Amino acid sequence: MVILCRNTCAENIKMINGVPKPYMGNGVGISSVLKVVSYYNGESEFIVEDGMFIARILLNIPG
């Protein structure tokens, strides 16, 4: 399964090892995504480009 999500965002999002750092507190959104990606032996990529936050997620879901 491939998931592509694009949202407008501020340009100053900080990334740590390719993962966005929460602006305030310890958000659960990205950490939840990473847990699911790990469970399904998938891959994820998070980037900020032209004012857009882009998440690309690949999950290896057996058929």
Image (cartoon, helix red, strand yellow):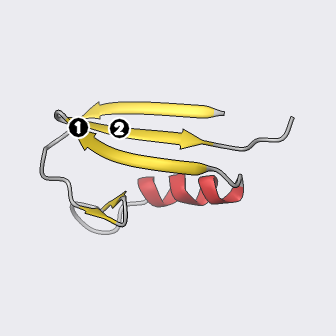
Q: Which residue is mark 1?
A: 49
Asked whether the beta carbons under mark 2 and mark 1 sit within 8 Å of each other, the answer is yes
- In the displayed structure, 2 sits above or below 20; it is above
Q: Which mark is residue 54?
A: 2
Would residue 54 be found to the left or right of residue 10 on screen?
Answer: right
Please give left or right for residue 61 compared with residue 28 in the image: right
Cα distance, mark 2 to mark 1?
7 Å
Image quadrant in which you'd find residue 61: top right
Q: Position of residue 39 (x, y in %)?
A: 70, 58
What is the x, y in percent for residue 29?
A: 43, 53
Residue at image point 27% right, 68% down:
25
Amino acid of disc 1: Glu
Residue placed most toward the observer, 24 or 6: 6
The residue most toward the right is 63
Residue depicted at x 53% and y 57%: 34
- Percent of width and height locating residue 33: 52, 52
Residue at 47 percent across and 61 percent down: it is 31
Q: Is residue 25 left or right of residue 5?
A: left
Type of amino acid at the residue the image marks with label 2: Ile
Residue that appears at 23% across and 37% down: 49
Q: Secondary structure at mark 1?
A: strand
Which image quarter is the C terminus in?
top right
